[in-house]
């Protein structure tokens, strides 16, 4: 379902990705996410603000003037660190990916 939303954007500091998270008890959950490459967070108070970044995002029964709010007052901050390289005994290497 998440892949059906168009998060393409002409804003240069946004990176979008489709990803799979595996939760307990080994259930796949898919999401489409957008990350801002800079530490500048946009002000998002209504759906029109969101569409200024993602102009092709359309959701049935949501008007431009509808307010946006955090669900259960929850905000996610994802931190990703590159931790190095794995060296295997057969001389193959695996670089960390963030």
Image (cartoon, grey):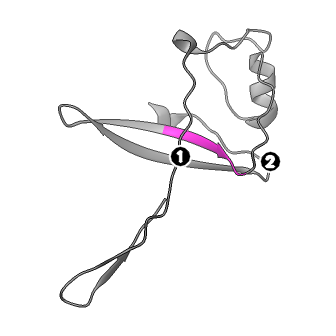
Residues packed near mark 2 inside 10 Å, few (<14), some (14 to 19) or many (20 plus): few
Residue that carries the numbered disc 1 in the rendered image: 79
Secondary structure under the numbered disc 2 in the rendered image: loop
Q: Nearer the viewer, mark 2 or mark 1?
A: 1
Left or right: where does residue 86 sit relative to residue 58?
left
Mark 1 element type: loop
Quarter of the image for residue 48 reads top right
| 81 to 77, vertically: above or below | below
Where is residue 46 shown, x and y percent of the image?
Answer: 77, 15
Could you say which is closer to the camera, residue 61 or residue 48? 48
Q: Which of the two discs, 2 and 1, labels the residue nearer the N terminus?
A: 2
- The residue indicated by pointer 2 is 11
Q: Residue 11 colored magenta? A: no
- Report which quarter residue 67 is drawn in: top right
Task: Locate residue 34, reporting x and y percent.
Answer: 62, 42
Whether residue 3 is situated above or below residue 82 in the rendered picture = above
* Magenta residue span: 32-37
Q: Nearer the viewer, residue 28 or 93?
A: 93
Q: Main secondary structure of the magenta part?
A: strand
Label number found at residue 14 = none
Up-down relation of residue 17 to residue 22 (above or below): below
Residue at the extreme front: 83
Dot 1, how many residues are within 10 Å of its Cα: few (below 14), some (14-19), or many (20+)? few
> Residues at badges 2 and 1 in contact (C-beta under 8 Å)?
no
Magenta span contains residue 33: yes
């Amino acid at each position: 379902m998440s892949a059906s939303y168009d998060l393409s954007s002409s804003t240069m500091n946004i990176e979008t990705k489709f990803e799979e998270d595996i939760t307990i008890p080994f259930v796949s959950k898919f999401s489409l996410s957008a990350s801002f490459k800079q530490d500048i967070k946009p002000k998002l108070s209504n759906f029109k603000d969101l569409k200024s970044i993602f102009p092709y995002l359309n959701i049935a029964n949501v008007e431009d003037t509808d307010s946006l709010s955090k669900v259960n007052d929850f905000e996610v901050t994802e931190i990703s660190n590159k931790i190095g390289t794995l060296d295997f005994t057969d001389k193959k290497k695996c670089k960390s990916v963030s």
